[in-house]
Image (cartoon, grey):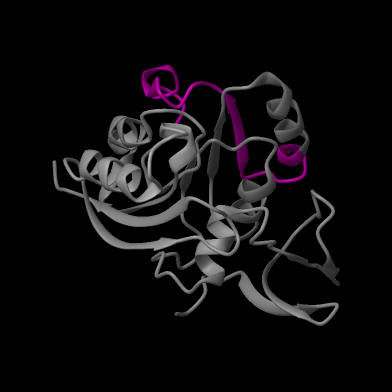
Amino acid sequence: MSLPDGVERHEFDGTTSVATRGHPEYGERTDGEWRRWDPHRSKLGAMLELGMDTGLSGGETTLYLGAAAGTTVSHVADFGGPTYAVEFAPRPARDLVGVAERRSNLFPLLKDARKPETYAHVVEPVDVLVQDVATRGQGRVARLNRRFLGDDGRLLAAIKARSEDVTADPESVFDEVLDDIGSEYEVLETERLSPYHDDHLGVVARPRPE
């Protein structure tokens, strides 16, 4: 699988890893201007490290749901176009604002991904929807935010089994979420994100035509 423009493999202290060019944000190792995209700290980084076909080519307009303090979305903004970062919790959102100050194309939004109507007036149509939310109803969140994606866009989601049901078998949870997503998206690829993230499923999907 080819990497997007602006994402390259570099060696960091004997470890070869995907990397982007930008300001370091979370103590990641660097090689000149390049910063390691640590797959243990990033589900999307793990998807790229595992060779999933994300469809990313570089320069895409992106809506990122569950941006937290900006670990992953900082890398996305490094190689992408306009990047809208939705985070619900005020504390990590403050850190996210700091990350955005160093990236003119990153726009933090203190909003709830379950209520896209609250930011629909701000977010333009996007090429990519990245979802990494720790909440029940992850399939519903993906469906609600379908409104921002063009028909040829991509959903890149990290489904967290423990956020849906701590006691349930993860495979059963994944099947339920995929069934939910299926009403609005065609699932193209799935892969467990082990060994980087336990009980997580990486999902690549494209929206069904409206």
| Magenta range | 99-123
Q: Is residue 13 left or right of residue 50?
A: right
Q: Is residue 21 left or right of residue 196?
A: right
Look at the picture and state if 78 lies above or below 19.
above
Residue 190 is drawn in which quadrant? bottom left
Instruction: Please tell me whether residue 168 belongs to the stretch shown in magenta.
Output: no
Residue 18 is drawn in which quadrant? bottom right
Task: Indicate the position of residue 122 as horizontal and vertical percent values.
Answer: 46, 26
The residue located at (29%, 38%) in the rendering is 146
Task: Indicate the position of residue 174 as horizontal and vertical percent values.
Answer: 33, 47
Q: Is residue 201 left or right of residue 93?
A: left
Total residue callouts? 0
Nearer the observer, 17 or 32: 17
Look at the picture and state if 138 lies above or below 207.
above
Instruction: Please tell me whether residue 106 belongs to the stretch shown in magenta.
Output: yes
The residue located at (62%, 41%) in the rendering is 106
Q: Quadrant of the N terminus?
A: bottom left
Residue sticking out furthest to the left: 210
Q: Quadrant of the C terminus?
A: top left
